[in-house]
Image (cartoon, rainbow, N blue to C red):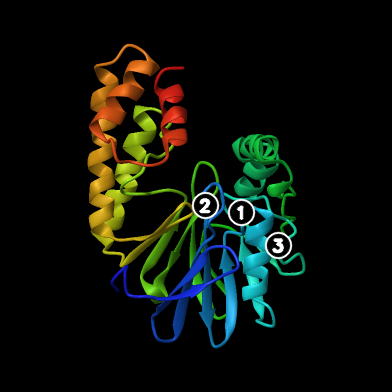
C-alpha cells in the first residue's frame, strides 16, 4: 500500500484521506488543529472504529459531522485521553496504564498544559473508559487489533491492513525524545517495524508513513545522540539540531527534547 494512494474528502476543518484495503478502509483525518493531530477511522462492513479521539472543539465538531449516522463500535483511547465530548455514547477502549497516564500521569500534565495554553478551544475532559484491554488481540467492529503496552500507554497493530499505530514518528519533524535511552528504545522499535515489513505506520501527529520514513527517523535519532554528546547545555544542543535539520517542523517538540537531554 502506497502512503500516497488515497482519496481526499474536505471537512469543515481539516481533511480526510481514505485508503482502500478492500474489506477494510482506513480514514486518516488531518484535523488541522494547533497540534496537527491525526485521527484514524477503521471501516469494515459499514461499521467504524476510531483510533485516538480528537481533542480540540472544532476538530470534534468536524469529525462528529463526518461520522453522523455511521455506526461507531468503539474508540481506542491511547495517548490522547482528552476530548471527552467526542461521541460520548460510544464504547471507549484502553489499557489500565493508559488510563493512569491520562488521569494522573504525564498525559494529564500535557492535558493541563494544553488547557492553559488554548483555553476553550481545547476539550480537557478525559474520556471515561468502558472496556479495559490487556496485552494481545481484541476484536472491535469485526476488526482484529493487537494491543502492545508501552511505558506510557499502548501501540496498536492492525494485521488486516498490515499497519501499526504508535504515538509519534514524523520523518521530517522533531519528536519528543526523553534522552539517549529513550532514543535507543525508539530506534529498536522502528527497526522492529522494518523487520516485520509493515505497509503503513500511523501516528497521532503525522500523516501515514512507511518503512523508508522509519529509516529516516532512525538516522535522525542517532544524530540527536551524537549532537548531545558534543554539547554542554540545552541552548547549544538546540542550535546544533536546528542547524543540522533546518527544514524540520515541530520546534516545540525540540524544546522538550532539549530539556530532557539537558535538564
Where's residue 142, x and y in %?
A: 55, 81
Where's residue 45, x and y in %?
A: 54, 88
CA distance separating discs 2 and 1 = 7 Å
- Name the one closer to the observer, 27 or 51: 27
- Residue 112 is drawn in which quadrant? top right
- Relative to 166, 209 lies left or right: left
Where's residue 238, x and y in %?
A: 35, 24
Q: Image height check: is 40 above or below 175? A: below
Q: Image height check: is 110 above or below 237? A: below
Q: For mark 2, what is the residue?
A: 154
Q: Residue at x 45, y 81 (%)?
A: 24
- Name the one closer to the observer, 42 or 138: 42
Q: Residues within 10 Å of mark 3 (few under 14, many from 20)?
A: many
Mark 2: secondary structure: strand
Query: Which of the image's four quarters has the N terminus?
Result: bottom left
Q: Residue at x 32, y 68 (%)?
A: 3
Mark 1: secondary structure: loop
Q: For mark 1, what is the residue?
A: 95
Q: Residue at x 64, y 53 (%)?
A: 55
Query: Contact, CB < 8 Å: mark 2 with mark 1?
Result: yes
Amino acid at each position: 500500500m502506497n502512503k500516497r494512494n488515497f482519496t481526499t474528502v474536505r471537512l469543515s476543518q481539516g481533511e480526510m484521506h481514505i485508503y482502500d484495503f478492500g474489506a477494510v478502509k482506513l480514514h486518516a483525518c488531518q484535523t488541522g488543529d494547533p497540534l496537527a493531530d491525526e485521527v484514524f477511522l477503521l471501516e469494515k462492513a459499514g461499521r467504524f472504529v476510531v483510533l485516538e479521539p480528537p481533542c480540540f472543539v472544532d476538530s470534534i465538531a468536524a469529525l462528529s459531522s463526518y461520522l453522523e449516522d455511521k455506526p461507531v463500535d468503539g474508540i481506542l483511547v491511547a495517548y490522547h485521553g482528552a476530548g471527552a465530548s467526542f461521541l460520548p455514547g460510544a464504547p471507549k477502549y484502553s489499557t489500565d496504564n493508559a488510563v493512569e497516564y491520562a488521569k494522573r500521569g504525564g498525559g494529564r500534565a500535557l492535558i493541563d498544559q494544553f488547557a492553559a495554553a488554548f483555553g476553550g478551544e481545547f476539550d480537557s475532559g478525559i474520556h471515561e473508559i468502558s472496556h479495559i484491554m490487556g496485552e494481545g488481540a481484541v476484536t472491535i467492529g469485526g476488526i482484529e487489533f493487537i494491543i502492545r503496552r508501552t511505558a506510557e500507554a499502548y501501540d496498536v497493530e492492525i494485521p488486516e491492513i498490515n499497519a501499526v499505530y504508535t504515538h509519534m514518528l514524523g520523518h521530517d519533524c522533531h519528536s519528543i525524545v526523553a534522552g539517549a535511552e529513550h532514543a535507543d528504545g525508539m530506534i529498536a522499535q522502528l527497526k522492529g517495524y522494518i523487520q516485520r515489513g509493515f505497509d503503513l505506520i500511523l501516528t497521532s501527529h503525522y500523516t501515514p508513513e512507511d518503512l523508508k520514513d522509519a529509516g529516516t527517523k532512525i538516522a535522525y535519532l542517532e544524530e540527536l545522540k551524537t549532537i548531545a554528546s558534543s554539547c554542554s547545555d540545552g541552548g547549544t544542543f538546540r542550535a546544533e539540531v536546528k542547524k543540522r535539520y533546518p527544514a524540520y517542523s515541530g520546534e516545540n517538540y525540540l524544546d522538550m527534547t532539549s530539556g530532557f537531554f539537558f535538564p
